[in-house]
């Protein structure tokens, strides 16, 4: 090997391993404008000094908000979170809000072994033009024992090896079930392109190489046999057949590879469903980001007094309206309403309701304080119960 | 009686009904192979059950467990018919043009791999159908919701001004899938979510069987298995099959209808045309796309074919009437009801 070649090889290796300094990392847990999102949806400012040694999110808290992030100074930003949890099915939902108010989100399952793990999210892959992120939310679901977040930072993704490692982590992260899955074909991101797109580009390139190679071989063979000008008909037919067969084989290979990746998500889905939902104590199963909501609905259904046709339902702040639709479906023939004052009341993890004796004190969804006399039919947990208000009291 | 046993009965009875209808339409001439019969029977029977429940509701009857008796009787009649015909050999509808040429070792290995992949896909879908709570919008607000309303009210509310009119939501949507869920709940004696959601999954299995059998007459075993794998591995297929949506059901009826129509082009057997027409009617009673997109396409294809081929005029007229009459008889009550109540056709 010549000295020139050796030098070029060493230089390439150094370039792959070294991190060019483009931008310093932003330690989000040690900045101003960091807020704890409490159980009732309100924001509690976290002192800059408090966050220096990590952040602790309580079992009832909803997450953390980082305002004024402004990562427009950073190329290829990567979000790194070091966290530990003790519960089995804790989901971390990362929501980024751009300058125009547009939100994007990603769900990550956190390992519930009580040890710290690092989770990296390539913003370029998931957020497109990531330079416009202003606010970052990190929500936690099913973390009843609390979440310890040792560090959270935005970093430049470094050298090529670093980026490949992050790309691999993002690629192998299973995609969890999502109600939006009905209308989208899920596919992991490779840098800034979807895996399916990458496969097709790869397939097309492979096909081009293959056909070119066949053409070259055919031409060489014809030259060797002395037929320099083969009859156009034979030449065209053979190449056409081989090209079609190659095209179909390539497409099939691309399809199978994409499907195998999809099956990986399915395996993980089965695993988490078994661990969190099926093997749990009856009624306490956790179903992904719905938590124990389905167990709660079943509990309500079994305890609705006869003759109750309508109910008011109160759900935690920031939850999807799908919760109300599900309640309406599950509890039928009892119809569940969110903004009507019915005598039969359902509170699910609602932090603004309290019962003292026979008196119920709560805040309705319009922010008005209300009260009523009645009785708790049954209690699910501290903030979840069903209450029947007495008429004419 | 255990829930599983009741659920099995709720599936077998419509399958027997479907087999009975096919048997009657064949008029003693075996047209379908056993595998085809298996692929066609349940979807045909499930569609007939939906039409039946709608029909009795229109006549003013309640939909209760007693309403299932005629279907059970027809199902038992189907058992008797099967017993009577058990000695008859089935020649199938077509001569197999690809009678299983020996596949090479690598193709046999690939067949085995694809079968494993199909098995995984179906197992995952079955697991999810049983375990996943109703999660997706259309199922919660339309398909299963309407079924629940009908089941708990023990009737289809035909009063236009009522809140629970035609199931209490999306009154312009057909009731096919919802009524079969009502049937399942009636037979099981209660609303059991895991079992109610199994209908699209069973239809998916029937679809794969139908496609396999239809292709097997023309292509090799490898291509038939590969085609089934390509269908079941479409990314949204499994989620639609376990989420309780109606799209898989619609997909089966359209696919079955066109497969049988194409078979009729070659075989010219009336039973093929009638079952094709019945499937198209069931597609219309499943989703509005059946009426707007697929029925016109099928009629266009049929009439153009009849126009172009060389056949006696009387036979052309008979075929046209057979197809359109079968569709009309089955789906007319629904269409007429919509027109009389000024419900949008789509």
Image: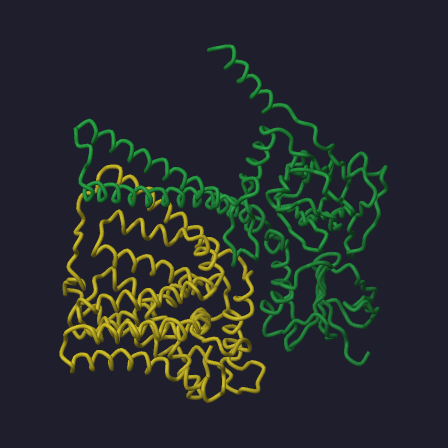
Q: Is residue A379 visible?
A: no
Quadrant hosting residue B321: bottom left
Letter of the green chain: A
Color style of the picture: by chain
Q: Nearer the viewer, residue A124 or A150?
A: A124
Letter of the yellow chain: B
Quadrant hosting residue A150: top right
Q: Nearer the viewer, residue A327 or A130?
A: A130
Quadrant hosting residue A214: top left
Q: Position of residue B241 (x, y in %)?
A: 44, 59
Q: Position of residue A269 (x, y in %)?
A: 52, 47
Q: Is residue A369 visible?
A: yes
Q: Which residue is pictured at 28% across the width and 35% down the height?
A: A215
Q: Position of residue A110 (x, y in %)?
A: 63, 41
Taking the image as shown, residue A93 lies to the left or right of residue B168, namely right
Taking the image as shown, residue A213 lies to the left or right of residue A12, namely left
Q: Position of residue A98 (x, y in %)?
A: 70, 51
Q: Which residue is pictured at 66% across the width and 75% down the height?
A: A310
**Which quadrant does the C terminus of chain A fall into?**
bottom right
């Amino acid at each position: 090997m010549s000295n020139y070649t050796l030098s070029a090889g060493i230089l390439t290796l150094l370039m792959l391993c070294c991190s060019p300094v483009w931008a310093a990392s932003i330690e989000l847990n040690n900045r101003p404008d960091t807020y704890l999102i409490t159980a009732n949806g309100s924001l509690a400012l976290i002192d800059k000094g408090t966050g220096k040694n990590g952040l602790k999110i309580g079992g009832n808290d909803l997450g953390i908000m980082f305002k004024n992030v402004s990562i427009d100074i950073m190329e290829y930003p990567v979000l790194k979170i070091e966290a530990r949890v003790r519960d089995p099915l804790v989901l971390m939902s990362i929501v980024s809000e751009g300058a125009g108010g547009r939100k994007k989100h990603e769900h990550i399952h956190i390992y519930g072994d009580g040890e710290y793990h690092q989770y990296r999210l390539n913003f370029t892959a998931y957020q497109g033009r990531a330079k416009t992120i202003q606010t970052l939310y990190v929500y936690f679901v099913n973390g009843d024992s609390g979440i310890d977040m040792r560090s959270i930072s935005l970093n430049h993704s470094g050298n090529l090896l670093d980026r490949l490692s992050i790309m691999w982590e993002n690629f192998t992260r299973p995609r969890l079930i999502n109600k939006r899955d009905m209308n989208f074909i899920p596919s992991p991101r490779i840098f800034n392109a979807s895996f399916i797109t990458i496969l097709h580009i790869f397939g097309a390139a492979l096909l081009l190489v293959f056909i070119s190679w066949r053409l070259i071989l055919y031409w060489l063979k014809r030259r060797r046999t002395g037929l320099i000008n083969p009859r156009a008909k034979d030449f065209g037919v053979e190449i056409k057949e081989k090209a079609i067969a190659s095209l179909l084989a390539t497409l099939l290979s691309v399809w199978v590879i994409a499907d195998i990746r999809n099956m990986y998500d399915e395996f993980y889905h089965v695993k988490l469903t078994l661990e969190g939902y099926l093997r749990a104590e009856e009624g306490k199963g956790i179903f992904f980001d719905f938590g124990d909501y389905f167990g709660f609905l079943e509990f309500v259904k079994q305890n609705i007094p006869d003759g109750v046709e309508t109910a008011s339902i109160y759900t935690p702040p920031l939850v999807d309206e799908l919760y109300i639709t599900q309640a309406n479906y599950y509890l039928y023939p009892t119809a569940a309403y969110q903004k009507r004052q019915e005598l039969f009341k359902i509170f699910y993890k609602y932090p603004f309701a309290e019962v003292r004796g026979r008196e119920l004190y709560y805040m309705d969804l319009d922010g008005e304080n209300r009260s009523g006399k009645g009785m708790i039919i049954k209690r699910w947990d501290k903030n979840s119960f069903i209450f029947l208000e007495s008429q004419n009291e | 009686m255990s829930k599983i046993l009741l659920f099995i009965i709720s599936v077998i009875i419509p399958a027997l009904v479907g087999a009975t209808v096919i048997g009657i339409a064949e008029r003693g001439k075996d047209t379908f192979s056993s595998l085809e019969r298996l692929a066609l029977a349940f979807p045909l029977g499930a569609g007939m059950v939906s039409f039946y429940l709608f029909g009795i509701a229109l006549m003013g009857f309640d939909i209760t467990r007693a309403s299932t008796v005629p279907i059970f009787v027809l199902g038992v009649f189907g058992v008797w018919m099967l017993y009577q015909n058990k000695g008859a050999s089935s020649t199938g509808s077509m001569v197999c043009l690809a009678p299983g040429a020996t596949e090479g070792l690598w193709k046999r290995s690939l067949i085995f791999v694809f079968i494993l992949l199909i098995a995984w896909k179906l197992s995952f879908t079955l697991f999810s159908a049983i375990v996943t709570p109703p999660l997706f919008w259309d199922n919660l607000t339309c398909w299963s919701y309407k079924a629940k309303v009908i089941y708990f009210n023990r009737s289809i509310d035909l009063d236009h001004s009522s809140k629970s009119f035609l199931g209490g939501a999306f009154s312009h949507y057909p009731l096919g899938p919802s009524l079969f869920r009502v049937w399942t709940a009636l037979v099981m004696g209660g609303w059991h979510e895991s079992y109610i959601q199994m209908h699209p999954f069973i239809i998916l299995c029937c679809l794969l069987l139908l496609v396999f059998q239809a292709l097997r007459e023309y292509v090799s075993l490898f291509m038939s298995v590969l085609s089934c794998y390509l269908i079941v591995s479409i990314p949204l297929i499994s989620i639609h099959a376990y989420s309780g949506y109606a799209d898989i059901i619609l997909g089966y009826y359209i696919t079955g209808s066109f497969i049988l129509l194409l078979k009729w082009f070659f075989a010219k057997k009336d039973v093929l045309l009638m079952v094709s027409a019945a499937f198209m009617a069931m597609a219309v009673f499943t989703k509005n796309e059946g009426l707007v997109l697929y029925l016109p396409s099928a009629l266009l294809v049929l009439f153009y074919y009849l126009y172009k081929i060389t056949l006696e005029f009387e036979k052309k007229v008979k075929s046209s009437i057979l197809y359109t009459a079968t569709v009309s008889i089955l789906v007319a009550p629904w269409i007429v009801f919509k027109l009389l109540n000024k419900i949008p056709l789509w």
